[in-house]
Image: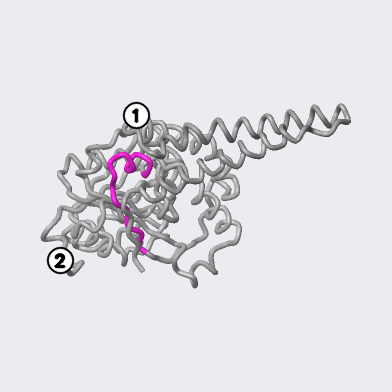
Amino acid sequence: MNPEETNSIKNIAVIIPFYNASTKIKEVVAGIPISVNHLIIVDDCSIEILPEEAILSVINSVTKVTFIKNEKNLGVGGTTKIGFLKAIELKCDVVVKIDSDNQMDLSYLPIMISSLVNNEAGYVKGNRFRDMKALKKMPFVRRFGNLILSFLIKIATGYWNVFDPTNGYFALKTSILKELDFDKISNRYFFETSLIAQLYYLNVKIKDITMPAIYGDEKSSMKVWQMPLLFSWNLLKLFIKRVIKQYFLYDFNIASIYILFGIPLFSFGVIHGIYSWIYYSTHHMLAPTGTIMLVTLTIILGFQFLLQAIQYDIQNSPNVSRNE
């Protein structure tokens, strides 16, 4: 299917959360294609004034523009959720979220929408880590921080084959949006991750679209190296909730057995090993062979059980495809 023909098939909305990007928003809006039926711009109590007249002067003649202003600052996630609700009210079939800083290439928009229309996925997002040329241009600290964060998010959400999960350039079907609990989706920096975590329980297929990263002169209020640290607690909670729900509430399978045996065995081996090492070293005694064997055996068995549980989790993650 030709991506340009998607307008005749689906009612499409683009959501732009706006905050302090008055010099860039006009360029973003000018790039919106005529296949988009609705443009929803949500002002998140920006210090800079949203240039509504300038936006209306550059938007194409087909796309209808809706301006919304939050009563208080909600963050990128909260602001995007306001846009989601408006898109559902407008009875849109597909929703695309882009940022207002002109760092997202809108030429990929037809491909993303086409993937949803053709039922290749229920959620389509950008992946900046498949383009080697663009990757070399990405600042090292940003690249390294994103690599670590991506791996931690894989573990927490169960989407092991998805990369660059914090990419804010994504599209999804409103039929899926209606099934989500918005209260469980973060209003701030954890927005994309918490959204993907909710998609996991719906077994939504995710597709990565390779695209280069575009960097301007804007500076994020969060340092990249801080992200894994700040996200760690939220990711841990996501992981624990996912394991309990997926393997003990919604189902009970071989992975559940692996976890039930693996965690106690491995924990006992590590704790008992540390205790024995401290005890015998402080008493200047050699640890008995039996103690050493018990510690070694429980650690190895527990670790093997946990590895099997991880392998099962990877093999049974929601079906994910990649754009090569």
Q: Amino acid at mark 2?
A: Glu
- Residue 111 appears in view: yes
Identify whether 244 is placed above or below 119.
above
Q: CA distance from mark 1 to mark 2?
A: 43 Å
Q: Nearer the viewer, residue 262 or 242?
A: 262
Q: Is 8 situated left or right of 71 in this image? A: left
What is the image's colouring?
Answer: one colour
Mark number, residue 5: 2
- Quadrant where the image shows the N terminus: bottom left
Give the secondary structure at mark 2: helix
- Residue 73 appears in view: no
Q: Nearer the viewer, residue 286 or 267?
A: 286
Query: From the viewer's perspective, is the residue at label 1 or at label 2 nearer?
Result: 1
Residue with the most extreme bottom position: 133
The residue that disc 1 covers is 249
Task: Provide the residue span drawn in magenta.
Answer: 196-209
Q: Amino acid at mark 1?
A: Leu
- Quadrant where the image shows the C terminus: bottom left
Mark number, residue 205: none
Give the secondary structure at mark 1: helix
At which x and y percent is residue 230?
A: 56, 39
Identify whether 23 is placed above or below 47.
below
At which x and y percent is residue 97?
A: 32, 51
Residue 199 falls inside the magenta stretch: yes
- Dot placed on the residue nearer the N-terminal end, 1 or 2: 2
Residue with the most extreme left position: 8
Other-residue count near label 2 (Cα within 10 Å), few / some / many at <14 / 14–19 / ≥20: few
At which x and y percent is residue 142?
A: 56, 56
